[in-house]
Image (cartoon, rainbow, N blue to C red):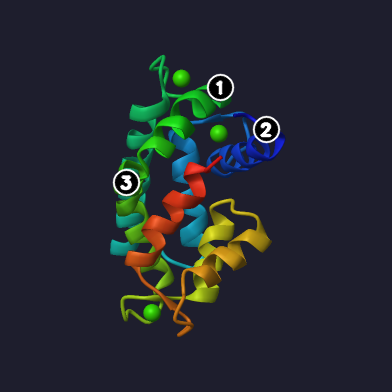
Amino acid sequence: MINSEYERRIAARFAAFDQDGNGHIDRADFNAAAKALLAEFGTAARSEKGQALYGGAEALWQGMAGIADRDGDQRITREEFVTAAVKRLRDNPDRFAEIARPFLHAALDVADTDGDGTAAVGDVARVLTVLGVPGDAARSVAAALDPDGDGRVGEAEIVPAFARYFTVPE
Ligand code: CA
Ligand code: CA
Ligand code: CA
């Protein structure tokens, strides 16, 4: 069942992945996302955290391409995204969580500025904003990741939440 609200949400997810806004999703978008996150938190690309983030971004791209790049041209068009990625990911959100986990783990590490294994809710909202989640949604998603209200978010919370956001239930 396609409706305008569903299509609007698909368009928002596509735009989030298409970081450079050139109309398709490819490896450059994932590198751009990693670069933007490192810049947001003042982390060097050559640092351990920086290298882990680029590695996670590459794994996320490879996983997305494996699911969605039907014609193998190393680009995910909007049509490929809608027909392959969203439907298949929605049918199997756990798969998307596994594909995204290395990137999210590394992103959380970058946002974990005091090294205690969790990121502050405000810093998670910064991560989500950099990744293209609109500001209002980023704040509410980040707050929802902290159900006990202690102001801290860990990997166990961010991975399934990210999968839920991007798999777009109808
Ligand atoms: Ca792009
Ligand atoms: Ca393609
Ligand atoms: Ca921390």
**Residue 119 visible (yes or no):** yes
Q: Is residue 111 above or below residue 62?
A: below
Report the Cα–Cα distance between label 2 and label 3. Answer: 25 Å
Q: Dot 2, how many residues are within 10 Å of its Cα: few (below 14), some (14-19), or many (20+)?
A: few
Assign a secondary structure to mark 1: helix
What x and y, as percent, mark residue 114?
A: 37, 82
Q: Which residue is mark 2?
A: 3
Mark 1 burial class by Cα count in 10 Å: few <14, some 14-19, many 20+: few
- Residue 68 occupies which quadrant of the picture? top left
Tell which tag, 2 or 3, sits nearer the viewer. 2
Real-space Cα separation, disc 1 to disc 2, in angstroms = 16 Å
Q: What number is the disc on residue 14?
A: none
x and y percent of residue 41 in the render? 49, 68
The residue tagged 3 is 94
Give the amino acid at mark 1: Glu
Bin the neighbour count of mark 3 within 10 Å (Cα to Cα): few under 14, some 14-19, many 20 and up. some
Q: Amino acid at mark 2?
A: Asn
Q: Earlier in the sequence, mark 1 or mark 2?
A: 2
Task: Report the residue at 39% width, 36% height from top.
Answer: 91
Identify the image quadrant of residue 51. Answer: bottom left
Which mark sits nearer the N-terminus, 1 or 3? 1
- Left or right of residue 169, residue 139 in this image: right
Side of 103 where 26 appears, left or right: right
**Disc 2, SS:** loop
Which residue matches tag 1?
79
